[in-house]
């Protein structure tokens, strides 16, 4: 896992009540990524994700679309210091 990176994603738009967190967790696990996803008070979704760069890029691409009911307006990606996570969880 030495080539792993950690990113923080902030997703804006219609992303609450559309299974965005659950779908993000499912996609991240398919890609072998670890981290968490949670709703924020401002209506956005926040995720911190660790894994290989190519898998992170694939997740970022997916986040721009999200699940079928979502209407994503913006995805902000920030590289943050490497963090280790156990699995991928939905935080409340």
Image (cartoon, rainbow, N blue to C red):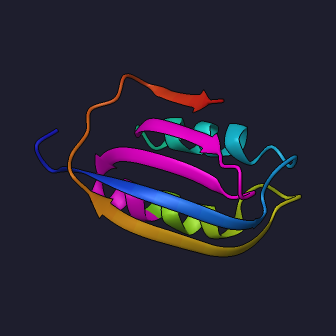
Is 58 drawn above or below residue 27 in the view shown? below
Between residues 64 and 36, which one lies in front from this camera angle?
Answer: 36
Residue at image point 61% right, 31% down: 90
Image quadrant for the C terminus?
top right
Residue stretch rendered in magenta on the structure: 33-57
Left or right of 10 in this view: 3: left
Is 86 drawn above or below residue 56 in the view shown? above
* Label total for image: 0
Query: Could you tell me residue 54's position as x and y percent?
Result: 33, 61
Left or right of 7 in this view: 5: left
Residue at image point 37% right, 66% down: 78
Q: Residue furthest top?
A: 86
Image quadrant for the N terminus?
top left
Between residues 70 and 81, which one lies in front from this camera angle?
Answer: 81
Query: Could you tell me residue 29's position as x and y percent?
Result: 51, 35
Does the magenta segment cover residue 43?
Answer: yes
Left or right of 72 in this view: 81: left
Does the magenta segment cover residue 77?
Answer: no
Residue at image point 56% right, 51% down: 46
Residue at image point 64% right, 76% down: 74
Query: Could you tell me residue 24's position as x and y percent?
Result: 62, 46
Query: Could you tell me residue 72's position as x and y percent?
Result: 74, 70
Q: Residue furthest front?
A: 41
Q: Residue furthest left?
A: 2
Left or right of 87 in this view: 10: right
Q: Quadrant of residue 83?
A: top left
Between residues 37 and 54, which one lies in front from this camera angle?
Answer: 37
Is 6 drawn above or below residue 88 in the view shown? below
């Amino acid at each position: 896992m030495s080539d792993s990176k950690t990113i923080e994603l902030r997703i804006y738009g219609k992303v609450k009540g559309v299974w965005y967190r659950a779908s993000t967790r499912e996609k991240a696990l398919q890609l072998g990524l670890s981290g968490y996803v949670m709703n924020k008070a401002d209506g956005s979704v926040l995720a911190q994700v660790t894994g290989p760069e190519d898998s992170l890029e694939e997740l970022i691409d997916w986040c721009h679309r999200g699940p079928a009911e979502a209407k994503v307006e913006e995805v902000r990606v920030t590289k943050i210091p490497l963090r280790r996570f156990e699995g991928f969880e939905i935080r409340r």
